[in-house]
């Protein structure tokens, strides 16, 4: 069988064993005790957070059973390998939705917890982990431990956003949200980065969901131009919420030998999107899938980046420094000549993240995808990371393949001792060994 | 011809991957299920999943089917829970290669009991129950391995071949009594049973078998290969003359 990959398909790894976890009982931890293990769900983290080169990957898509659904109380318990898509398919007919969803529904519940993912409503709802009521964890000691914000809270705080390093998540109990059956969405054109900062405050207070798409190639006066997408659940109209779309409409059938997304194609694409966005005024009724998961419409879109894969940059910068940092980051990208197809800009709210290593914190986050062009890309990332460091920012481990150990250890300096005390020593990942070489 | 009913179903070997997938599909349609499996914790997980996915009623019974003394009691409890029984699925199985079976006759015996002896006795009782109703479908999971004895897994193959013949006979015997018998012959399936076998392109997901079982029952099929291409492979294999076949290392 092909070795599992991360979404960026970089770095490449070779695992000693890939073991499907069949039952939520901890039996999967009994074999190959001398090798480090890591749970691997749908492999949607971009870099090496979901890889364990030379070790064992415990694949969790086989842990796909539901345990209990209380539709009245809006609470679901399921096994860790259930995907968010499967959760939404199950709960949508009850008028329920997940309180926080990332940009793809093809992640597992275990992965969403391990990376404490966030979505377009972070400024209101915080991270995914804030809505996790309970986690059952199998540890390499053979123990099965239930943790929650009140029961074994130190282990809970380490497990949420804990990059899969505190053990194997078996089951989780999630709070669901009662929602309308569609979204009312609006797109506002942003002429520049100043425009984003001028409008995003009001946008955040008026809208449950907001995110800006940014043209990372624009320069000068138009630096940071983009589109601000806003949305709110429509008032319930007595009809059941529409079901999630069963499958993707399009699929990238095979890996291209080179990246389709060069500077010129991306520039042309961005110009078209921006022009369209400027024309699309007013409020539209949108299905949840189209609003939250537009990229899921193209299955395996990561293959268009070619054999070398893609690398993603995502940082969060504290409020006081965010405007200055964003300007510097975007200017560096547009000057580099490296083309970013997807630029996303969003303000994180003040809601505290529950995990010790949770990435989101109050400020502004910028996410950019780049085709991996080896040394050139690494050089650009080096410059971007320096800007992040200079503004006391942090990088998102779930997206990262290139940060250096100093950055990781600095951004989590306050939390690392407590995290290390809860970590399961039999678990490790390629990311962990890269950023914590001495741990 | 109207589709055959699949609303009240008994699943023996309910914790097997293929049975779970079948139960999941039936649960999604609101079926009533009786689930029988050996391990109580695993069985509870399967039963809970079926309830959440929409099964109208679920009754789980932990039992080892290799103890034929329990068969009568299990069947009568299942029948009294469901009332009419639309379908009984038998999905228990144990895979072991020839080397392992030769090294451990106890293992060979377990393969024969799990795949043939216990199913044969259980199917006979189940057939009587359905015949007394005058309706229902009996489905059992056999294997392509039962189509021809091969050096690499002849004990397993013999157990499945025996099961295939038993089902053939039951189908014939029950035909005039309103009971239909389906033989399901999966090829390589990505399940715990085959965790020790290196994966290749021929492997099918257990969900494909689950869907095939539901389809086969509804359409009243007699024998189904899953995926369908195994029919072609096994047809060729069955027709290789024995004097040639004995020289092959399949």
Image (tube, coloured by chain):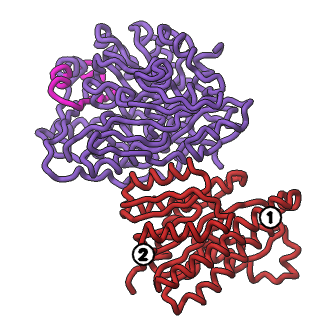
Chain colours: A purple, B red
Q: CA distance from mark 2 to mark 1?
A: 35 Å
Over which residues does the magenta segment extend? Answer: A200-223
Say whether residue B64 is left or right of residue B246. Answer: left
Say whether residue A222 is left or right of residue B210. Answer: left
Q: Is residue B66 above or below residue B53?
A: below
* Residue for point 48% across, 21% down: A152
Question: Is residue A340 visible to the viewer in this orientation of the structure?
Answer: yes
Question: Is residue B202 visible to the viewer in this orientation of the structure?
Answer: no
Q: Quadrant of the C terminus of chain A?
A: top right
Q: CB atoms at circles 2 and 1 under 8 Å apart? A: no
- Mark 2 chain: B
Q: Which of the numbered marks, if any, corresponds to residue A402?
A: none
Say whether residue A420 is left or right of residue A390. Answer: right
Q: Which of the numbered marks, if any, corresponds to residue B109?
A: 1
Q: Which residue is mark 2?
A: B84
- Mark 1 chain: B
In the image, residue B222 lies at what x, y percent? Answer: 56, 82
The answer to whether residue A206 is magenta is: yes
């Amino acid at each position: 069988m092909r070795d599992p990959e991360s979404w960026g398909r970089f770095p490449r790894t070779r695992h000693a064993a890939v073991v499907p976890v069949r039952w939520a009982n901890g039996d999967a931890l009994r074999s190959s005790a001398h090798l480090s293990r890591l749970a691997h769900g749908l492999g949607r983290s971009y870099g090496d957070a979901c890889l364990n080169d030379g070790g064992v990957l415990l694949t969790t898509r086989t842990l796909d059973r539901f345990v209990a659904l209380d539709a009245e109380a809006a609470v679901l318990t399921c096994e860790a390998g259930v995907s968010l898509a499967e959760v939404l398919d199950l709960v949508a007919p009850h008028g329920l939705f997940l309180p926080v969803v990332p940009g793809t529904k093809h992640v597992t519940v275990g992965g969403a917890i391990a990376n404490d993912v966030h979505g377009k409503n972070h400024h209101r709802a915080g991270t995914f982990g804030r809505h996790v009521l309970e986690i059952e964890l199998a540890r390499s000691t053979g123990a099965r431990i239930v943790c929650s914000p009140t029961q074994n809270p130190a282990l809970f705080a380490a497990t949420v956003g804990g990059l899969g390093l505190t053990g194997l998540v078996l089951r989780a109990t999630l709070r669901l949200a009662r929602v309308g059956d569609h979204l009312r969405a609006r797109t506002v054109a942003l002429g520049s980065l100043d425009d984003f900062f001028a409008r995003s405050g009001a946008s955040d207070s008026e809208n449950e969901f907001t995110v800006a798409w940014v043209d990372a190639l624009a320069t000068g006066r138009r630096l940071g131009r983009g589109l601000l997408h806003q949305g709110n659940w429509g008032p319930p109209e007595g009809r059941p919420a529409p079901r999630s779309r069963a499958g993707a409409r399009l699929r990238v059938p095979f890996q291209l030998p080179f990246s389709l997304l060069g500077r010129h194609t991306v520039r042309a694409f961005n110009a078209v999107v921006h022009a369209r966005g400027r024309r699309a005024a007013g409020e539209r009724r949108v299905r949840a899938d189209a609003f939250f998961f537009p990229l899921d419409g193209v299955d395996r879109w990561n293959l268009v980046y070619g054999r070398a894969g893609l690398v993603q940059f995502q940082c969060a910068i504290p409020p006081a420094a965010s405007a200055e940092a964003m300007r510097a980051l975007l200017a560096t990208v547009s000057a580099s000549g490296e083309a970013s197809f997807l630029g996303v800009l969003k303000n994180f709210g003040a809601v505290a993240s529950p995990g010790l290593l949770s990435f989101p914190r109050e400020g502004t986050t910028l996410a950019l995808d780049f085709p991996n062009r080896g040394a050139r890309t690494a050089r650009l990332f080096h410059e971007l990371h320096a800007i992040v460091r200079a503004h006391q920012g942090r990088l998102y481990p779930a997206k990262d393949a290139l940060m250096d150990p100093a950055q990781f250890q600095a951004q989590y300096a306050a939390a690392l001792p407590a995290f290390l005390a809860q970590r399961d020593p039999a678990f490790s990942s390629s990311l962990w060994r890269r950023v914590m070489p001495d741990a | 011809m109207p589709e055959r009913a699949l609303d009240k179903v008994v699943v023996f070997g309910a914790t097997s991957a293929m049975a779970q997938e079948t139960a999941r599909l039936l649960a999604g349609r609101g079926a009533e299920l009786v689930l029988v499996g050996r391990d109580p914790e695993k069985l509870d997980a399967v039963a809970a999943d079926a309830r959440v996915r929409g099964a109208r009623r679920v009754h789980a019974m932990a039992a080892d089917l290799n103890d034929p003394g329990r068969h009568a009691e299990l069947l009568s409890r299942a029948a009294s829970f469901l009332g009419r029984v639309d379908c009984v699925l038998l999905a228990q199985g144990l895979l072991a290669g020839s080397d392992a079976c030769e090294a451990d006759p106890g293992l060979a015996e377990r393969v024969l009991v799990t795949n043939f002896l216990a199913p044969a006795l259980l199917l006979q009782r189940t057939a009587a129950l359905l015949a007394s109703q005058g309706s229902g479908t009996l489905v059992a999971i056999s294997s392509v391995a039962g189509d021809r004895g091969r050096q690499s897994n002849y004990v397993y193959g013999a157990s499945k071949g025996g099961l295939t013949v038993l089902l053939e006979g039951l189908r014939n015997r029950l035909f005039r009594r309103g009971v239909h018998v389906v033989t399901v012959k999966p090829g390589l399936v990505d399940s715990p049973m085959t965790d020790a076998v290196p994966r290749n392109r021929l492997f099918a997901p257990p969900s494909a078998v689950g869907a095939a079982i539901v389809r086969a029952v509804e359409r009243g099929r007699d024998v189904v290969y899953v995926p369908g291409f195994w029919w072609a492979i096994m047809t060729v294999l069955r027709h290789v003359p024995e004097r040639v076949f004995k020289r092959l290392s399949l």
